[in-house]
Every structure is written in C-alpha cells, then in structure tokens.
Image (cartoon, rainbow, N blue to C red):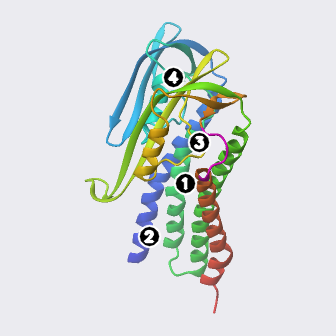
Amino acid sequence: MMGPEKKVLGFGALLLLLIGLPLVWLGLRNMWRGFASSGWPVTEGVVQAAEIVSKDETTSAEIAVTYKVGAVPYTTDTLHFGQTVGSGDSSEAQMRALGYPKGRRLWVRYDPSRPEIACTEPGFHSDALWLPVAGAAFGLPGLVLLVMATGLGGRRQLKWGLYLFALVFGLAGSAMLWVGGERLWLAHASSSWPTADAEIVYAQQDESTSYEDSVHKRGEVSTSYATNLVFRYEVNGLTYHSNLRRIGQLAGADEDWADGIAAQYPKGKKLKVRYQSGNPQVAVIEPGISSEAWWLPGAGTAVLLFSLLVALFGVPALTREY
C-alpha cells in the first residue's frame, strides 16, 4: 500500500509530467518544423491582415497571410515556428506589424504533405526553445517527485531525487549562461559594426505589475517600467526595423530608468545605429558591453554553481550512511 506521503508526491509528479511532457513534444515539433521548413516548396503569398492587439499587459501582432498551393487557397498566421503569441514588450508587436504591412507580397514555405502548415520565415528560430524549456521546467521536477514517491525514505531514491533536482538547476543555469554569453559576444562585436542612419518610429512606456493573486489581480507585489523603442534604418537600399537599444538590455526596472530612456530617445529622433554586416536585421543603438548585459550570464553562473554544489557536496552529505 502507498502511504499518504507517497500518494501526495505521486499526484504531484503526475500533474507536473502531464503539463511538462506535452510542452516538450510541442516544442520539439516546432523545432523540427523550423529546420525542415528551409527545404519546403515556395509559393507567393500576400498579407491580408495586420492588427496589433493589447490584452491585459501583453501586446501581440495578429498577422494573416494568404497563399495558394495549386488552386487551393490557404491562410497562415505563422511567421516562424515557435513564435511567441504576445509579449509585455510592445515593441515586439510593432516590429512584426511594421515588417508585415497589409498588402505586402512575400514568399511562403509550405509543408508538401500538409500544405495548410506554412511559414514566412523558414529555419530554426530561438523562440522555438521556449516550449521545450518550459516543458523541462515542469517535467524534470515531476521526475524528482516520481523518484521520491517510489521509495520515500530510501536513501537510494533520495539520492537520485536530489541528483535530478541538481540537474534541473544545472540545465537552467547552463541555458542562461549560454544565451548570456552569446549576448556578451555580440555586444563586444557590435562596437566595430558598420553604421547606418536611423529614426525612432516607436517609443512607448510600458509597465508590468505582479500580484500575489495573479488570477484576481490582488495584493500588488511590484511594478516594473520600461520604454520600448523601434527604429527604422536602411542598408543597401533595404529598410529594416529593430528594437535593440542595447544587446542584453533589461526588460524593465524602476520608473526613473524608463523615463530617462524616453527622454533620450523620443519618437522622430534621428540617430546613428550599428548593424551586423552579415545579418543587417540585427542593429543596435548603443553598441558595446553595458552593465545590463552581465545580468543573465551572472545569474546563469550562480544557478549553475548552486547545482554543482548540490551534486558534489549536498547529495553525499544528505545521503551519507551513519
């Protein structure tokens, strides 16, 4: 018979696995479609709708692209596989809307076996990592609880449960360190990128509030503020848009910080930006490594070190035979 403690742990493990495993599967499917889409057939499409929608504290751009395969019409709202639906950063939606104005003609890649599956930006995009990472964040703790539920009180089960716990934090820290390190490298390289004339076409101050009761929005905990920017620039006669003020920039901070950015970069301001010569879609207003760029790799290093300490010292100490 399973005791009450094991039943609670088993139920928790089942719940986390039921949430995590489908997210991992959907994320891996998006990643596979992203890689595969580069080799899919091409057809011409046209943007039929481009609307910015704000709900609560998130903003999204709803893009609809129509295309034909043979004589059969289709519609897709997928720009790239794994794309996020909405964001607290309103500039993300503005970027999509500016890049996909109504009436624009463009190329669409479609799955030859299922033509209703299509995208306008083929290839792998980092957005596709969000679902598998979120799934792992639920699934791995579920495995920890499952191991503990199958042998509560046994040192062997406790040992492996703690190792899985350390693995969860190790993977999270490694991912943060990888992304943060890549941003530091880009920030360093951006100082030597070529320059282009640009203009601020969007400047919006947003705020985000967290609550103790997120469902009913009760018990305010904290509010962060941000000034989100979009600038337009040209490279070799082609127009691009970017929302990067700094590489590795903070998503939000206090109100004075946001007010300072708003005063420095009002809509309509002309300025020089630096763009990546091999990928002109990446451009930044303030090149170089700033203090903001150290937050993510610093946090990743701290989380990774914690996981290593748990694995190397915590597990042996807690499972030692006396």
Whole-angstrom CA distance, mark 1 to mark 2, is: 18 Å
Determine the image quadrant of residue 311.
bottom right
What's the residue at 49%, 6% (across, down)?
71
Q: Which residue is mark 1?
A: 136
Q: Nearer the viewer, mark 4 or mark 2?
A: 4
Residue 316: quarter of image: bottom right
Residue 314 horizontal/vertical position (percent): 62, 78
Tell me the element at label 1.
Answer: helix
Packing grade of label 2 (10 A; few <14, some 14-19, many >=20) is many
Q: CA distance from mark 4 to mark 3?
A: 21 Å
- Across and down, in percent, residue 45 comes to 51, 13
- Which of label 1 and label 3 is nearer to you? 3
Residue tagged 4: 99
Q: 125 or 111: nearer the eye?
A: 125
- In the picture of the structure, the residue carrying the numbered disc 3 is 246
- Front one among 87 and 139: 87
Above or below: residue 243 compared with residue 139: above
Given contact means CB atoms under 8 Å apart, are the residues at marks 4 and 2 in contact? Answer: no
User: Disc number at residue 9?
Assistant: 2
